[in-house]
Amino acid sequence: MAEVEIHTEHDRASDPFGQRVGVMVGAIGIILAVVTIASHRAHTATVIAKTEANDQWTFFQAKKIREHLLDVGAGLAGALGGERDNVRELAKQYVRDRDRYREQADAIEVEARAKEAQSAAEERRALWLDVAEGLLELGLVLSSLYFLSKRRFFALFGAIAALVGSAIGVAGFMI
């Protein structure tokens, strides 16, 4: 039986531009991984902040309901109880509790608005990182097409897309 020998050529030595493109593809892949992780973390932070804001708004509503109930109770006690001392004292207690709930609700509202602002900021960051991720992926694919076609313009367009994506990614980290 005849032996079959398969000779493979390594065209690394004959294609120095291809070597540079290969290194560029590796670098783009590393940057893409970092931006992708940051994007996912920004989306997670957005969801967490939004959930915390929703929790604060629910707490705010509970305080406002208590405030309203005590306001109604104080009004009813005053209207129906007349001049009795125990009813007047109960109405005063209701008013004190109502005012306390109002102050607590105001503080909770401030915290809820801050959480909403944090959620919006994280969503903006995630958007920038998503755009950067898309451009880096485009750069990776375009650059890789060089190896199939040996056309340098693929590497050039890939490098441009990757540079723009990297710049947008840096901007996303700065926001």
Image (tube, rainbow, N blue to C red):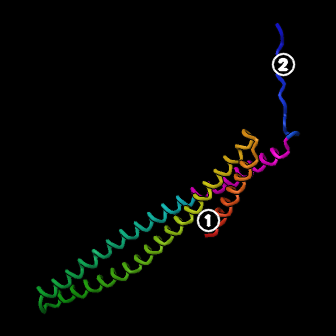
Q: Give the residue at mark 1.
A: 172
Q: Which residue is mark 2?
A: 5
**Magenta-drawn stretch contains 20:** yes
Q: Residue furthest top?
A: 1
Secondary structure beneath dot 2 equals loop
- Range drawn in magenta: 15-40
Q: Residue at x 73, y 40 (%)?
A: 149
Disc 2 + disc 1, Cβ < 8 Å: no
Q: Position of residue 33 (x, y in %)?
A: 66, 52
Q: Look at the magenta stretch and give its main secondary structure.
A: helix
Q: Position of residue 126 (x, y in %)?
A: 55, 61
Amino acid on which the number 2 mark rests in the picture = Glu
| Residue 83 covered by magenta stretch | no
Image-based side of 104 in relation to 119, left or right: left
Quadrant in which residue 59 is drawn: bottom left
Q: Locate residue 97: give its quadrant.
A: bottom left
Between 25 and 97, the one lying in front of the other is: 25
Give percent across and percent down for residue 1: 82, 7
In the image, 73 versus 163, the foreground residue is 163
Residue at horizontal 70%, vertical 52%? 158
